[in-house]
Image: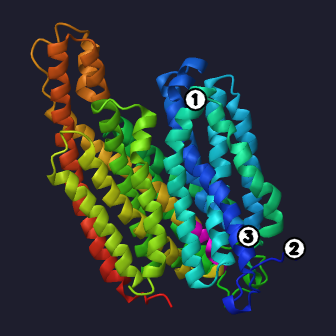
C-alpha cells in the first residue's frame, strides 16, 4: 500500500480532518518511543551512581548535580519549548529533540569526567524539554475526536508508567552486565524507529498564526522555573535553609514579571485589534495565561500535580523502607513495585470507557480518593512487620493515580484550543515535574524532620564508633543502617530497631498529611469538574 503525502495539520475542526485510523495509531506507537525514553532516563541513572562515583571519582556534590542538572534544565524550558513547537511545528521540534537527545546521550555515555557528564545531563534536559510537550500536543491534533483522544492520552500516560517500572530494572541490569554508560547509550536504539518512520507517519501541526518568538519571555520562564525547582530540590536534600527559600522567592517574583509580560503582550496583540497579529508578524505571548481562567483547565492541572505529588512522595519512603529496612537490592525493590506500576497502566486504560457512563470530574475525584485511601492504609496501619501493607497501599494509590492522571491530562488538552496544544501540553508537563518535585521535597522534608526528632539511639553507641557516624545516623535512615554495620550484634539490632521506629513514626505523620491533601483535592475535583459532561 502506498503511503499518502503528509500535510500540515493546524486547528481545523475534527469533522474536516481526513480520517486514516491505522495511520493515527501507528503514529501514536511511534510517539511512545520518546515517552518511554524520557521515563526510563528519569529513573535508571540513579542506579548507576555508585558505578559513576567509582569510575569518574565524582564527589558528593558532583553526584547531586549529575542527577539535578537534567530536571533543572528540563523544567526551565518546558513552557518555552511548548510555545516554540506551536510556532515552528510540533513534529519538527520533536525530531530535533529526538536527534539531539540520542546524540547527547551517546556522547555522555563515554564522558571522561564528572564535569563532562554534568554538562551532558544539562544537554539532555534541553532536548528532553523539546520531546515531551511535542508528543502530547501532537496527540491533541492527531486525535481531535474526544473518545479516541482520551484513549490515546491513556496510552501516552501508560508509556510513562511503563518507563518508570522499566527504569530501575533496566538500569540495574545494564550496570551489572555492561558499564554505567550503557544506561545512557540505550537511548540511541530506542529513538531510531521514530527517526526512521516518523517523517512518513506523523503529521505536522502548528499554530496557524503564531507571531514572532518572544526571547525575553523565554529568559523569564527560565528565571521562574530554575530557581523554584532548585529551591525545592534544596529543601528536599538539605532541609529548610535561607538559600532554598530565597531561591524560591526569586522564582516567584520572576513569575509575577512573566505573567505581567504575557498579559501585556496579549492585550497589545489581541486578534480583534491588531492587524500585525492577524498576519502572524507580531510578538505574541509565549504563554496564553487566559487558559488559567478556565476552571476546568486549572483544576485539571491541580489534579495532575497532586496525583504526581502523591505518587512520588510515596515512592520516596517506600524505596527507603524496602532497601534499608527490608534489605532488598535496588533492582529487587524495583521489581517489587512493578505490580503497582502495572496497575497504573491498567487503571488509565479502564477509565477511558468509564467516562462514557460517569462524568469525568467524578472519575478524577475517584482517582484522588483512591490515592487518599492508599495513604490512609499507611497512616493508620502497622507496617513494621514487612513490606506487604506498604506494597498493597502502593497498589491502591497507583490505581488512583492512573485514573486521575489520564483524565486530567485529557481535560487539560480538551479545554485548550487546538492551536495552543503545545502550550497546554507544556503546562501539563510542567505540572508533572512540579508535582514530582513537591512530592519529594515536601513529604521528604516532613519525613526527615520526624525521623530526626524521634530517633533515640541506645546508650553506649557513641563510645564505640566515630562521632561522624553517630551524627550521620541521626540525620538519615541510611546513616543509621551504616552505623549498625559497625557495631556488634546486640547493639546493631538495637540501633536498627530504633531507626525503624523513628522512620515508621515519620511515615505515619507524612502519610496523614498526604491523606488530608488528597482528600481536599478529591473534594475540589468533585465540585469544580462536576459540570464536565460524560463522553459521548
In terms of secondary structure, where does tag 3 sit? helix
Which mark is first along the chain, 3 or 1?
3
Q: Can you identify the residue that label 1 sits on?
A: 175
Residue 215 seen anywhere in this rendered image of the structure: yes
Q: Which residue is mark 2?
A: 3
Q: Which residue is mark 3?
A: 87
Q: Position of residue 32 (x, y in %)?
A: 64, 60
Question: Which residue is at the far left?
Answer: 459
Give the magenta-colored segment's residue range. Answer: 419-425
Task: Tell me if label 2 and label 1 are in contact, CB under 8 Å.
Answer: no
Residue 431, compared with residue 535, is above or below; it is above
**Residue 194 colored in magenta in the image:** no
Find out whether the residues at labels 1 and 3 contact each other: C-beta distance under 8 Å.
no
Residue 441: x %, y % from top left: 36, 46
Q: Mark 2 packing: few (<14 Cα in 10 Å), some, or many (20+)? A: few
Residue at point 31% right, 62% down? 371
User: In which quadrant is the N terminus drawn?
Assistant: bottom right
Label 3 crowd bin: few (<14), some (14–19), many (20+), radius 10 Å: many
Q: Residue furthest front?
A: 1
Q: Earlier in the sequence, mark 2 or mark 3?
A: 2
Q: Secondary structure at mark 2?
A: loop
Q: Residue at x 22, y 62 (%)?
A: 516
Amino acid at each position: 500500500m502506498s503511503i499518502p503525502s503528509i500535510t500540515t495539520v493546524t486547528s481545523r475542526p475534527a469533522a474536516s480532518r481526513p480520517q486514516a485510523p491505522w495511520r493515527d495509531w501507528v503514529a501514536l506507537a511511534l510517539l511512545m518511543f520518546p515517552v518511554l525514553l524520557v521515563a526510563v532516563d528519569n529513573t535508571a541513572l540513579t542506579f548507576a551512581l555508585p558505578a559513576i562515583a567509582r569510575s569518574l571519582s565524582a564527589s558528593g556534590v558532583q553526584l547531586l548535580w549529575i542527577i539535578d542538572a537534567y530536571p533543572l534544565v528540563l523544567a526551565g524550558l518546558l513552557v518555552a519549548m511548548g510555545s516554540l513547537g506551536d510556532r515552528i511545528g510540533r513534529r519538527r521540534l520533536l525530531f530535533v529533540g529526538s536527534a539531539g537527545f540520542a546524540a547527547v546521550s551517546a556522547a555522555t555515555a563515554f564522558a571522561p569526567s564528572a564535569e563532562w557528564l554534568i554538562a551532558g545531563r544539562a544537554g539532555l534536559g534541553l532536548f528532553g524539554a523539546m520531546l515531551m510537550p511535542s508528543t502530547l500536543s501532537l496527540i491533541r491534533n492527531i486525535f481531535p475526536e474526544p473518545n479516541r483522544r482520551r484513549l490515546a492520552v491513556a496510552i501516552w500516560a501508560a508509556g510513562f508508567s511503563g518507563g518508570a517500572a522499566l527504569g530501575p530494572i533496566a538500569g540495574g541490569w545494564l550496570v551489572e552486565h555492561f558499564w554505567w554508560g550503557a544506561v545512557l547509550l540505550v537511548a540511541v536504539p530506542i529513538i531510531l524507529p521514530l527517526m526512521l518512520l516518523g517523517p512518513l507517519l506523523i503529521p505536522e501541526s502548528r499554530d496557524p498564526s503564531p507571531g514572532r518568538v518572544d526571547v525575553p519571555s523565554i529568559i523569564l520562564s527560565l528565571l521562574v522555573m530554575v530557581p523554584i525547582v532548585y529551591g525545592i530540590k534544596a529543601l528536599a536534600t538539605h532541609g529548610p535553609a535561607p538559600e532554598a527559600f530565597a531561591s524560591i522567592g526569586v522564582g516567584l517574583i520572576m513569575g509575577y514579571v512573566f505573567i505581567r509580560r504575557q498579559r501585556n503582550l496579549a492585550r497589545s496583540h489581541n486578534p480583534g485589534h491588531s492587524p500585525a497579529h492577524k498576519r502572524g508578524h507580531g510578538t505574541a505571548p509565549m504563554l496564553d495565561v487566559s487558559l488559567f481562567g478556565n476552571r476546568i483547565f486549572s483544576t485539571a492541572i491541580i489534579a495532575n500535580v497532586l496525583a504526581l505529588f502523591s505518587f512520588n512522595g510515596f515512592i520516596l519512603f517506600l524505596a527507603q523502607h524496602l532497601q534499608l529496612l527490608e534489605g532488598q537490592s535496588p533492582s529487587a525493590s524495583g521489581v517489587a513495585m512493578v505490580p503497582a506500576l502495572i496497575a497504573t497502566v491498567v487503571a488509565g486504560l479502564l477509565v477511558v470507557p468509564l467516562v462514557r457512563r460517569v462524568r469525568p470530574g467524578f472519575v478524577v475525584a475517584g482517582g484522588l480518593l483512591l490515592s487518599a485511601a492508599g495513604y490512609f492504609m499507611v497512616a493508620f496501619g502497622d507496617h513494621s512487620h514487612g513490606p506487604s501493607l506498604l506494597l498493597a497501599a502502593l497498589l491502591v494509590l497507583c490505581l488512583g493515580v492512573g485514573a486521575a492522571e489520564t483524565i486530567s491530562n485529557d481535560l487539560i488538552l480538551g479545554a485548550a484550543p487546538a492551536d495552543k496544544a503545545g502550550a497546554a501540553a507544556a503546562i501539563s508537563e510542567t505540572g508533572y515535574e512540579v508535582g514530582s518535585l513537591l512530592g519529594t521535597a515536601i513529604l521528604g522534608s516532613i519525613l526527615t524532620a520526624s525521623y530526626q526528632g524521634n530517633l533515640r539511639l541506645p546508650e553506649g553507641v557513641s563510645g564505640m564508633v566515630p562521632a561522624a557516624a553517630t551524627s550521620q545516623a541521626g540525620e538519615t535512615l541510611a546513616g543509621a543502617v551504616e552505623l549498625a554495620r559497625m557495631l556488634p550484634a546486640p547493639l546493631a539490632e538495637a540501633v536498627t530497631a530504633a531507626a525503624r521506629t523513628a522512620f515508621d513514626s515519620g511515615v505515619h505523620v507524612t502519610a496523614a498529611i498526604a491523606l488530608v491533601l488528597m482528600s481536599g483535592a478529591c473534594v475540589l475535583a468533585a465540585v469544580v469538574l462536576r459540570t464536565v459532561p460524560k463522553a459521548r
